[in-house]
Amino acid sequence: MKGLKHLPSSFIQKYLVNKIVWLYILAGGFVLGAALLGLLESSVTIPVSTILHIVSENAFGMGWLDAVPKNEELIIWDIRLPRVLLALCVGASLALAGAAFQGILRNPLAEPYTIGVSSGASLGAVVVIFFHLTIPGLGGFTLPVTAIIGGMITLLVVFGVVRLTNRGLAIETIILAGIIISSFIGALTSLIISLGDQDSMTQIIYWLYGSVAMRGWSHVQLIFPFMIAGAFILLIHYRELNALALGEEAADHIGVNVKRGKIFILVGASLLSGAAVAVSGAIGFVGLVIPHLVRIVTGPDHRHVLPLSMLVGGAFLIIADLISRTIIAPSELPIGVITGLIGAPVFAALLVRERIAGRG
Amino acid sequence: MLKIENVFGGYSSSPIIQGIDLAIENAEFFALLGPNGSGKTTLFKLITGQLPIQSGSVLLSGREIPVYSKLEKAKKISVLTQEVLVSFDYTVEEIIRLGRYPHQKGILKQLSKEDRKVIEDVMEKTKIIQFRHTPFSMISGGEKQRVLLAKALAQEPEILLLDEPTNHLDIKHTFQILDLIKKQQQETGLTVLAILHDLNVAALYADRIGLLQNGRLIDVGNADTLRKEAQLKQVYEVDVKTGSHPTVPKPQILMTPEHAERDFFDFYNSYQIEKNSTYIHMQFEHPLRTISNGVIGEGIHWLKHFCNFHVDKHYNCADPKSDLRERLNNYHIPHEATVAMMTAVNLEDMVMETKDINGIPMLVIVTAGVGNAIDVSNEYTISAGTQIGTINTMVFIDAHFTDGALVNACITATEAKTKALHDLQIKDRESDTIATGTSTDALVIGLTQQGEQTPYAGSGTAVGKGIGQLVYRSTKKAVNKYLKRIRQ
């Protein structure tokens, strides 16, 4: 009898484990498929075998084709591949940061863009780009470091405003404070841009919309170390993120060092969002939409939500970038337009659902 | 287990906790009571380390609380508070897994076999295994609290701190949760330190009780500590009266609201009597404080209806209580507000007498039959009554009696009845001695509770004398009527 009673439960357990394994395989496949599509689809058509050869040849020194046209190699290796990889890194970083912000703030609407971190990072980046600043010792990393610091300062200011309104970390209050600070910082950014000439103005405004175009390998190198560091910090804190779902006091009662955990998680998420903004401008709603999609399938356990959000977020942004450069070809849309068009309605839907849940 | 020594502490410079000494024994259930703001939750936070101790010390298993790391502490103490709001749709099992946080080892911090076993075990214990895969947000408040209890038990603590865990629950779920905790305490030796709001619930579950006022422990002891009415009144500023639970040997506290002052009413205009061959129904406009041994309405109550039903002289019913309830229903008399008794004598022979004693109005109704007259003092065994015969006495008084005075009144009325039987030379057939009563006599004393409260109603008091005289006279008359009727 006892064995029988436990059968369904262990069956479900097994089913759940299998489901999770398949989800990782699926997400990984999505990333590879999206990357391949991103390399393949453009104004110049290059066969898949040639693409694979070029990538393999350059990455591992293993090629199988003889004569590959120099211009094709240039397009794939120096233009398309860094662009795809950059989209992958930015999407993964933003989605992971979004999942972490949502977890730590217990707020399904939080993400780098909605709580103002992206705008702060943008301001930092604009200052560096506009004034051609270089912090001694940082060299090329001046841009991401400044953006990260800008994002962190903004986060502190937003928390300060929320605390002053004395409403705890209420869902709408954080978003409202994020919007207020974003508007203010946006005005500052505009002020700086207006001081420049017409040319740099257009350039920066276009950059602000968010884009992974015209970046190259240097930008991939800029974001990569921060993405690895941020992801590592967040992934080892998945249990703390789960515990914080009960609230800080209850998390403390089960032995979580809440203060230390919060600092690590906020720093990790700031590293990811700041670095992403530094290389691609403020791309909104990736951090909102992706973790929600992932949660629908996996449930809220951060052990799986965090890594899967990274994979799906990266793949999603590769696809979004592909759409942005093909939909009105030969012109390009800023990628932020695509994510905004998808993300803002989702944001609205989530807000409505929160309100309904809050009433019920 | 847990030792609190001369502790001062709280939020600001002026400490809320003003020097508390308390030792919680291993495996006991200790309840902290006290009004809002007395420092119960502050004391809890000093124990959990959420608030700093300003002076004194809190020792857990002999070591000071601040010495423990968060993880070590979480293995010893777990906390169950009021319902927490969980963000995102975690399943019940995912919430319970969080309770294993302090026990997880290694770099990956995966759930071990041991962890899984504990989780299964606590889910079984708290009876939530059937919704382990259900989202926490989808289950009811009582079930949520059981899940959070399971999470707290999954920590395998030595002490469970309860901070009003049943505040928002209905009585079913309150008792369910506390029964689970009590069982855990008794079976595994879990120590429980609980903040409870409900004094009566605390009396039922706690082994010891501590009463907090203005940051000081003013009394510590077993549940009988709650019998100190003056102390409770002083602490809570509410008029309380301590009674006893009818089946559990624990006190229960009754609160008196300020609105309880009642309007004065005239005794003689406050009742109606309905009388026919099947029943006598005395109905008062206001409930009377009653003491009775009637089939319905036995004990001490507040009741409005007083009934005496005629039954056949061969009446033999296995369940007279439900039989009488049915009869009351037939006449649309609410049985929950009624004292009801039965008799086989002719109800036409009822005697009703009224009298004012020292300005206190009294009314007595007696129906009497002495076929089963018995002398309780002789040694004959009781034989089943074959004759009709019961003396049913109802005494209504416009006075204010304590519970003790109610008992006095019962004694006095009984003495008067016995004296009447003596004077009429009513005999026990078996022993041929003077009878003291019949085998099934019923009595009700009803008080309007108007006027000055009287603690005594025995034969040494005017009101006692009045009861005696009136009952004596009525009983004598009623027995005479009965004797006359059977002689016919």
Image (cartoon, helix red, strand yellow):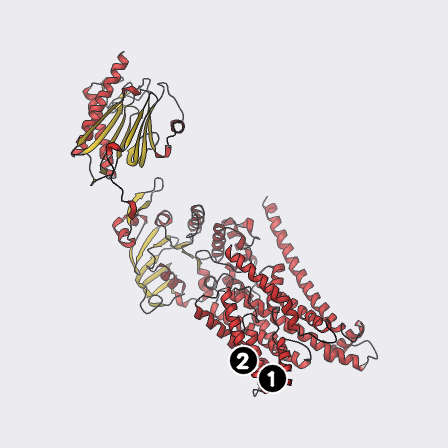
Asked whether residue B164 appears in the rendered view, the answer is yes
Front-lying residue, B327 or B212: B327
Q: Looking at the picture, which amino acid does disc 2 mark?
A: Leu
Query: Which residue, given by chain and number where applicable, does mark 1 sit on?
Result: A129
**Residue nearer the viewer, A180 or B117:** A180
Does label 2 lie on the same chain as label 1? yes
At label 2, counting other C-alpha atoms closer than 10 Å, the crowd grade (few under 14, some 14-19, many 20 or more) is few
- Residue A62, how many percent across, how many down? 77, 77
Count the marks: how many? 2
Q: In which quadrant will I find the C terminus of chain B?
A: top left
Q: In the rendered view, would you say B332 is above or below B401?
A: above
Identity of the residue furthest to the top in this view:
B488
Along the viewing direction, whichever of B272 and A227 lies nearer the viewer: B272
Q: Quadrant of residue A15?
A: bottom right
**x and y, in percent, of residue B258 in the image:** 29, 48
Q: Position of residue B114 (x, y in %)?
A: 54, 57
Q: Is residue A319 left or right of residue A240?
A: right
Q: Which residue is mark 2?
A: A188
Q: Secondary structure at mark 1?
A: helix
